[in-house]
Amino acid sequence: MGGKLDFEAVELRSWVQHICLVRTLTVEKSCPDLLHHSSLKSLLQDAEILKKITEGFKSFQAMEVNTYNHSLHKILFQWECYSPRQQKIALLALLIFTAFYSTGAYDPLDPNGNITIKWDVVSWTPDGYVAVVTMNNFQMYRHINSPGWTLGWSWAKKEVIWSMVGAQTTEQGDCSKFKGNVPHCCKKTPTVVDLLPGVPYNQQFSNCCKGGVLASWGQDPTSSVSAFQVSVGLAGTSNKTVKLPKNFTLLGPGPGYTCGPAKVVPSTVFLTPDRRRKTQALMTWNVTCTYSQFLASKNPTCCVSLSTFYNDTITSCPTCACGCQNKHNCIKSDSKLLHKEGINTPKKDNTPLLQCTHHMCPVRVHWHVKINYKDYWRVKVAVTNFNYRMNYTLWTLAVQHPNLNNVTQVFSFDYKPLVPYESINDTGMFYGMKFYNDLLMEAGPFGNVQSEVLMKKDKDTFTFKQGWAFPRKVYFNGDECQMPPPESYPFLPNSSPVGSGPVTKFTTSLILILWFMW
């Protein structure tokens, strides 16, 4: 490997897929062909890639470079290894990628992840319809934790909600014009939340009443669905007269999700309990919501620190990795205020109460290269909570590393490989064992979980040089964590860390290209 990180074909393949997903560039016949190339060399020699990158580069009128995306780190490590043409292709692809990714909701480690909200009209009423609304979380490692989801929309006409089962609106609105039967909600823009566990049986519906908590699809598919029934009045009473709701919003539980318009789809087919008869919804429409970390928070919510057995240096999280806006309201770990009653009670607005650290992140993930065997190597992973007002149920940790294709044993976490790009097996999800460590407690002596991972070496790629042993990306609860800069990684004795030359070279090239764009 020449002492440098491999520029994996999957990286460029990911860029090409990003470009293909931009509507103005989608060419269905050529994208799959590009993605099926097996080597970096063939990718870089394909003139169609350069053509698409050039076309895509011109199609973006406003280019905002997102320096937070740490795919950049991999490029900086190996920048000097590229030929001028490779540098050109990689740089242009990265510019398009960052411009799209900074404003969109595409997750390269979970490209098909979304929350789909399905409305099935199951019966017509004299003035409207009864619908079953089902929310499916198809995200592999991003769940919705307490206090749960909040779903909103705008009615197209003057619809009202007569009744609901399995959920409720947060406000009734002005129903003064109704006499006799009063609707459950008369607002033009209703806001719906799940019911809490333990409600009376006659208020329950299948897959309801979990306090709005939705597990991720990869962690627990059976718990990744929520549903309720709604009776809508003053609405259309046939497929031709029904007007679809619009302006859907989803909080999960905070911001970050963007929902598309409702689209009519083929009617859902249901199987009766005895599995001998199929019934069909009278009408079905779907709403797809996708998540963007940049909409959810202007700062990262977690960071990564690194250490090894072959170097005494501990690479800590970057200073102010998650922003230092809370540094004046933090609490030292030995403060007497920690003994005050109610200190761990969450606030309604989920304002964190963080332990004072240099990084000021609610969560830190530590990756320690522990032991080197002849055919195997072992890593210790520890997740620490620094938020005194938050514990994390059903937490997930997604990691990208090339040797995750040879995981031999995970000792005290559950583990599931994630294969978003078919044959590329470099991403995995760690999560807690049920009833053992699936709850990450609030900051304090019990606010951490840890495990060890044993991986078999691939003799063609394994090395401790130039940071290969460290993860490429780390996500906690679906949000990407701030990695330390590559030049600060612990390095092997008698070798030097990555210098600042590639960074300067990259920055200069970036400024020149952006200057020519304007």
Image (cartoon, helix red, strand yellow):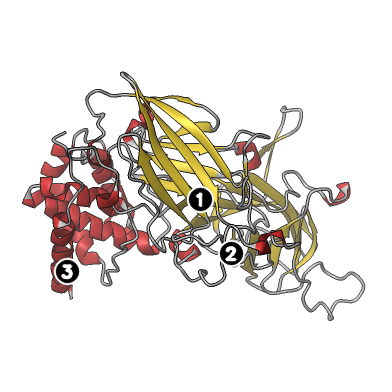
Amino acid carrying mark 2 in the image: Ile
Q: Residue furthest right?
A: 180
Q: Looking at the image, is mark 2 or mark 3 nearer the viewer?
A: 2
Residue located at (21% from left, 47% from top): 497
Residue that mark 2 sits on: 331
Residue located at (75% from left, 57% from top): 230
Residue that mark 3 sits on: 511
Q: Is residue 257 left or right of residue 191?
A: left
Q: Secondary structure at mark 3?
A: helix
Q: Closest to the observer: 513 or 349?
A: 349
Quadrant containing the C terminus is: bottom left
Q: Is residue 196 left or right of residue 505?
A: right
Q: What's the mark number on residue 114?
A: 1
Picture quadrant of residue 52? bottom left
Residue 476 visible (yes or no): yes
Give above or below for 66 relative to 483: below
Q: CA distance from mark 2 to mark 3?
A: 41 Å
Picture quadrant of residue 346? bottom right
Amino acid carrying mark 3 in the image: Ile
